Amino acid sequence: MKNLIFCAIILAGFLLVSCTKEETKQTNNNIATVANINVVFNNTVSGMAINTDNTNYTNAIGNKYTVDILKYYVTNIVLEKENGALFYAKNYNLIDLNETLQNTISLKNVPTGKYTKLRFILGVDSARNTSGLQVGYLDPSYGMIWTWNTGYIFFKHEGNFTNSANQVKPLRFHLGTEAARGFVEVWLPEVNINGINSKLTIDFDLNQAYSSSSNIDFNVDNDRQSTEEVDRFWISNLKNNLEKSFSYKNIE
Amino acid sequence: MKRKLFIFSLLSFVIVSFRSVNEIQFEVPNSFPKPVYNFSKNPLSENKIQLGRALFYDPILSRNNMISCASCHSQFSAFTHVDHALSHGIEDKSGFRNSPALMNMAWQKSFMRDGAINHLDAQSLAPITNPVEMDENIAHVVAKLQISKLYPQLFFKAFGDSTITGEHTLKAISQFMLTLVSANSKYDSVMRKQSVFNEQENKGYILFKKNCSMCHTEPLFTNDEFRNNGLKIDTTLNDYGRYRVTKNKADSLKFKVPTLRNIEFSYPYMHDGRFKKLSQVINHYANGIEKSKTLANELQKPILLTANEKVDIIAFLLTLSDKSFLFNPQYFYPKEIFSEATKN
């Protein structure tokens, strides 16, 4: 019985593959109407690549800090054309400074044309944030689920910082909960997706996360990983900052 | 297009027939409501349940491989921890609450004394990660399971994939917990008209329905909600219950209403295990209610009970003991699974 099922699956798989091949041929006969594109998230501090080797970085208000862990969810990517047409990529990605392969998101069959906006959710949408375990990069093994509360951690930065008394203290920011979901909109200068180029790079600036809208002083906040009332202000500050920390770099 | 449809129907037939071979239908006891748990997202199968059972009893889930779920959730006590008021975890570190008894999990909307976690599948992450419980992380658990002799084959049998994921690990543990259904106490047989209460139990039942069942609602003996039941705050623990999660003052001192099924065996009682005996619990409700802003509406009026009536209520509560649950061999330590591993 099991063998029979196995054969049937193989057969069905084979038939499916042959179908898709035919379709690709057809589109090749015309001018390419869709293209595959990789969106690469480039993690920086003020434009410079981030090292996890205890290098000190300085934020806008002069806090010195390091980065050991930097992870955040980029989900529900939408590309918008100048005429308003939208391309929805139903994907869930975990950008991780220490796992560079994860920072390239491949979008398949994107209609060709000029795009003016890239939008995504910084975090996990409500449906998946509150309905138990999910798969792929939302798997609990990625360490991004609260273990004493409901839902996912959307953004995580851990390292240390040097406080105003010149002592090295741990820096631990875990941002999550329904109020913390960020909606990011990156302006694109009429990026032409044409099937020739294949890589769209988006910069993330960690310093902006602590200063783009309002300054976050590590001397005041250096360990936040909860949903407490006292954290509400910090949550909204960091969320608002994060939404403005992404920018277009180039397409090649 | 037609061909695609044909293939699709062929594929779905294959999937459906494959699933029906392995799936187990969750049995809802006659008097019980519809379960809260969505089984369609984690369909039960014998192999998954057995995998979950092995994981439940395996200390591999803890940092030092010495503490298992069963360490604080033993079957003979309705899957709680009877030795201590506050449960002990790794290296005998003390937690700040009494571990809850595990049963009838499929009907619960939230988990933990404060309802911090809204889904059974994510629940096990909490004790695995807590530094005074198992002090592990799920990624490391997955790595340990993957290099073990036993688990890659158990996961293959259960999920058709020997590559272990956190999702599969936790869903398997859920499956075992979902099978912990207690619905076969004397109370249940009386309700099914297969037996009768004695006079004292019957008096106790009437008093229970009058004074207790608003929160400890039949047939699950909990309304699955949060209440401040008038316990004086322990000033060393300073545990404000659900407030810890919601930070809403209206939730201060509220805890999840626990089931009373198998209460004879799940001592000590209350979120901090402050009462060792049922008589102390009844005395608390009769004489010990501490008034505060968030005290449950149900407890605003005093519950007046004579000494005899207190004993009657306890006699009724003892009819909620379910021996077929407490000694069900399907929940035992899975010796046969673990000995198979040492043989290989």
Image (spheres, coloured by chain):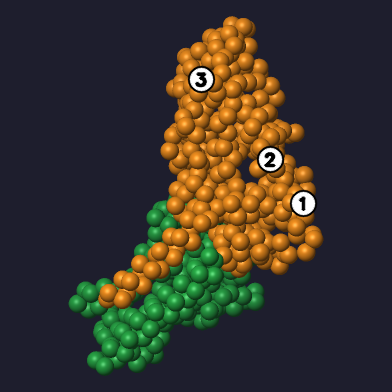
Chain colours: A green, B orange
Provide the residue designation for mark 2: B329
* Marks 2 and 3, the one that precedes in the sequence: 3
Q: Position of residue A93 (x, y in %)?
A: 46, 70
- Structural distance between the alpha carbons of marks 2 and 3: 26 Å
Residue drawn at 41 percent across, 86 percent down: A199
Which chain is disc 3 placed on? B
In the picture, the disc for residue B66 is 1
Q: Is residue A109 above or below residue B289?
A: below
Q: Nearer the viewer, mark 1 or mark 3?
A: 3
Q: Position of residue A41 (x, y in %)?
A: 46, 77
Residue drawn at 59 percent across, 78 percent down: A51
The answer to whether the residues at label 1 and label 3 have Cβ atoms under 8 Å apart is: no
- Which quarter of the rendering shows the C terminus of chain A? bottom left
The answer to whether the residues at label 2 and label 3 have Cβ atoms under 8 Å apart is: no
Which chain is disc 1 placed on? B
The kind of secondary structure element at disc 2 is helix
Same subunit: marks 1 and 3? yes
For the image shown, how many numbered marks are present on the structure? 3
The three-letter code of the residue at mark 1 reads: Met
Residue drawn at 25 percent across, 78 percent down: A81
